[in-house]
Amino acid sequence: IVVFFDDREKAITAFSTFTIAIFTIVLVVVTNRQARLARESIDLARQEFIYTHRPKIIVREVYYPVQYPNPGDQFFAAYTIANIGETRAHIVESTTSGEYTNQPRLLDVQDPRGRNEIGDIFLEPGASLRLSLQFGDMKWGGDQLIFMPDEPNVGLFFVGRIIYSDERGIRRNTVFRRQYQPMSRRFYPVNDTELEYAD
């Protein structure tokens, strides 16, 4: 009788151990599958968010920041780029320049052609970056900064193009052409939606 119950106990113990092992394996498989489904659900939600919430780079606050310049001072423009969108923007190409023209027509804004003068930077939603651009050898006291004709499309301009991408790699353009007004020391957008826009 003792031997019978001893053998029966060993069998029950072995069966219990085997059952627990099977249950543990099933639990691991189910847990891993649930974790994978949770990750996929999070990734899908993130992708949907990116699809419906995009970055948007704008240029603002363009002006000459020196209130009382001296003759011979270097002329430059201070400006701000800002991401007013809802996801991160990556600046991948950019070009900015100062132009003086006495021709009553607007010049096209250049294509960066792989250049990135602003720099390979990321702008989070709501973030901004203060920058400046020197206008070549242009200095206070030169004809170009004394004579500012009050005609559209004639005078001093700050122009540029910023190409940026979202987290899916979709590229967008921000193009600007601002005309300088000496009374306010500010650069104002030109009235042309082909030369002043943000995709």
Image (cartoon, helix red, strand yellow):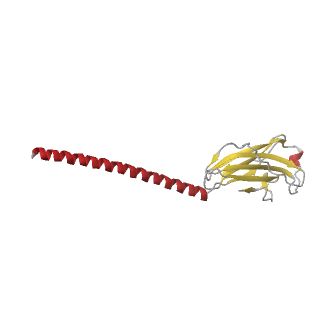
x and y percent of residue 91 in the render?
67, 47
* Residue at 88% over, 43% down: 142
Q: Compared with residue 141, is residue 192 higher up or lower down, i.e. above or below?
A: below
* Residue at 25% over, 49% down: 16
> Residue 3 vs residue 101: left or right?
left
> Residue 25 vs residue 60: left or right?
left
x and y percent of residue 15 in the render?
24, 48
x and y percent of residue 44 in the render?
53, 56
Between 18 and 145, the one lying in front of the other is 18
Between 96 and 110, the one lying in front of the other is 110
x and y percent of residue 194 in the render?
79, 57
Between 14 and 47, the one lying in front of the other is 14
**How many numbered marks, from 0 up?**
0
The image quarter in which residue 47 lies: bottom right
Assign the C terminus to one quadrant of the image.
bottom right
Q: Is residue 108 visible?
A: yes
Q: Is residue 59 visible?
A: no
Between 47 and 66, the one lying in front of the other is 47
